[in-house]
Amino acid sequence: WLERLLSHRVAQLNFGRPCDAHARLSDFKMLPRLLFLICAALSASRAVAQEQQAVADEPLQAAESADAAPEPAEPEVPQPPKKEEEPASNPIPLAVGGAAALAALALLLGGGSKKKQPAALLLGPSNAGKTLLFHRLVNNEIEETVASMKSDEGIVDNKLLVDVPGHRRLRNEVTKELKRATKIVFMVDAADATRQAKAAAELLYEIFCQDSRPSLLILCNKKDRPGAKTPARIKLTLASEIETLHKTAKTMGSTGDDTQQVAPIDTAGKFFSFESHAPCACTFLAYSAREDKLDAVREFLLK
């Protein structure tokens, strides 16, 4: 039947008369493959039809099973549908969450506004040796340290001492701690004073801008290192940097920049000097936080 159908179709495609078309089609080598594809397509179509019929019969079967009468031997009394019970809620997570929320609210309203206790500060650029000196003063031991990323507190002769990190990204931490400063031990790496001069001058200028006037002990640390600068040389370098910062601050302030702080420094047209123009008492001292005694620092903190 398929062969006759194909013969007729080929005849319609101008292969000649039906009889000639049938003769030519019988010689085609692709005929077996063509027949196989046609059979496969018919089989797949039949399978799809059976699957669709099965899906359509499912609701009918369910309805017939629902309408079936119960067996006489085992009569069943119709029961009302059971209401699905909701799982009982556990009050413990709710209580824990409520307590945590109340604690956070109390910390926000009360703890965040708590005034910090007055303290002496260890300040200076990063890698100046502050943390090493802090551990010697507080723990009476030498520890190998790395650059600090958060403040640390300790007691020295019944006085609170705070080691404040000097990294530029943590400058806001310095600003907060300056509000409670009673004295400041300021440290500069004497062996790297040229590179640290700008960062050190920026910190000093911020100290000069505070309403309080804490005394400063400026330690020119690492005096034993090769190439270490003298306190006189470091003082001159820092004074030059502060002179530039002060001129810039006054210029920006005069243009209406309210965010720019201007230190109460009046040089009367002269070059800035710590002795004549610094609003805080500043003492320079050559020092080694690793080798020198702590007497000079303790005496300054106890004054």
Image (spheres, rainbow, N blue to C red):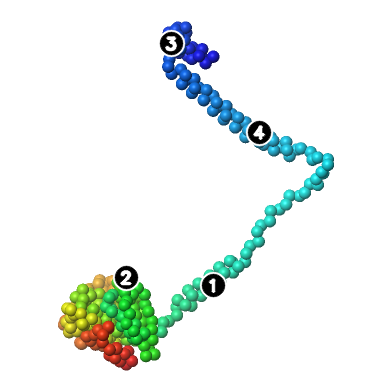
Residue 14 numbered tag: none
Q: Residue at x 33, y 80 (%)?
A: 143
Q: Which residue is mark 3?
A: 24
Sequence order check: which comes first, mark 1 or mark 4?
4
Along the horizontal axis of the image, is 130 left or right of 98?
left
Q: Secondary structure at mark 2?
A: helix
Q: Quadrant of residue 118?
A: bottom left
Per the model, the C-alpha gap separating discs 3 and 1 is 93 Å
Disc 1 + disc 4, Cβ < 8 Å:
no
Per the model, the C-alpha gap separating discs 1 and 4 is 60 Å
Q: Nearer the viewer, mark 4 or mark 3?
A: 3
Along the horizontal axis of the image, is 78 left or right of 135?
right
Does 227 sit above or below residue 44?
below
Q: Secondary structure at mark 4?
A: helix
Which one is in front, 277 or 61?
A: 61
Sequence order check: which comes first, mark 1 or mark 2?
1
Q: Nearer the viewer, mark 2 or mark 4?
A: 4
Per the model, the C-alpha gap separating discs 3 and 2 is 90 Å
Disc 4 + disc 3, Cβ < 8 Å:
no
Per the model, the C-alpha gap separating discs 1 and 2 is 32 Å
Sequence order check: which comes first, mark 4 or mark 3?
3
Does 208 sit above or below residue 18?
below
Q: Could you tell me which quadrant the N terminus lies in?
A: top right
Q: Which residue is mark 2?
A: 169
Q: Which residue is mark 1?
A: 102
Q: Position of residue 239 (x, y in %)?
A: 19, 80
